[in-house]
Image (cartoon, rainbow, N blue to C red):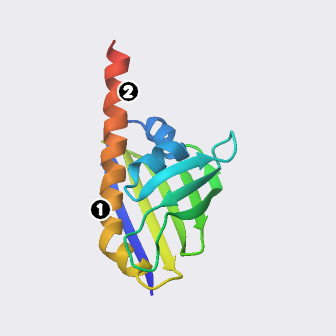
Amino acid sequence: MTVRVERRFTLPAPCEEVWEFIADPEQRARAISVVSEYELEDESGRKATWYIDIPIPVIRRAARVETEDTERDPPNYVEFVGRSKVMRVTGTHRLEEVEEGCRLTNEFVVDGKLPGVERFFKHNLDTELENLETAIREYLAENDRNDRR
């Protein structure tokens, strides 16, 4: 079974500002609750290793997920893939200028390789996307506060 989730939200900022967050693998990793740690693999930010803690019986330690941005079209689109022994995840972030600011459409597809992985993400992926939205809103608010100083 493959788990697919799409979530769209509008942010009150130009797409260039939202892109700053989306294009930064550290920002993305910090927004996901199951990422216990991460390492940047190159200066461009296209490759990173995430260590994820998924609370299922067959996984006894953090799973290492090698992530890579496979396509970038700043500030409109980024696609990434993450590979590990426990799963494969693909994700896209599409940014579109709208009257209210920037519409961000996120799509994630998780293919589990071990029992329980897909079930975990089926129940939790929408929450992880809510975490991502919250982190972006906090990032934009902090930038706005800094701009006012």
For the question of whether residue 1 can be seen, the reply is yes
Marks 2/1: CA–CA distance? 24 Å
Residue placed at 57% from the left, 63% from the top? Answer: 64
The C terminus appears in which quarter of the rendering? Answer: top left
Hey, what amino acid is under mark 1?
Thr
What amino acid type should be assigned to the residue bearing mark 2? Asn
The quadrant in which the N terminus is found is bottom left
- Residue behind mark 1: 127
- The percent coordinates of residue 13 (x first, y second) are 36, 36
| Nearest to N terminus: mark 2 or mark 1 | 1
Q: Where is 122 relative to 53, above or below?
A: below
Relative side of 46 to 1, left or right: right
Task: Give the image quarter of residue 129.
Answer: bottom left
The image shows residue 97, relative to residue 65, as above or below, that is above
Residue lying at the far top of the rendered structure: 149
Whether residue 99 appears in this view of the structure is no
**127 or 92, nearer to the observer:** 127
Q: Residue at x 59, y 47 (%)?
A: 39
In x, y percent, where is residue 26?
51, 43
Front-most of 30 and 100? 30
In the structure shown, which secondary structural element does the residue marked by tag 1 occupy?
helix
**Quadrant in the rendering for residue 113:** bottom right
Circle 2 SS class: helix
Q: Residues within 10 Å of mark 2 (few under 14, many from 20)?
A: few
Q: Which mark is residue 143?
A: 2
Q: Residue at x 70, y 44 (%)?
A: 42
Location of residue 120 in the rendering, given as x and y in whole percent from the top left corner: 36, 75
The answer to whether residue 127 is above or below residue 118 is: above
* Residue at x 54% of width, y 75% of height: 86
Numbered circles on residues, count: 2
The 10 Å Cα crowd at callout 1, few under 14, some 14 to 19, many 20 or more, is some
Asked if the residue under mark 1 is in contact with the one under mark 2, i.e. CB atoms within 8 Å, the reply is: no
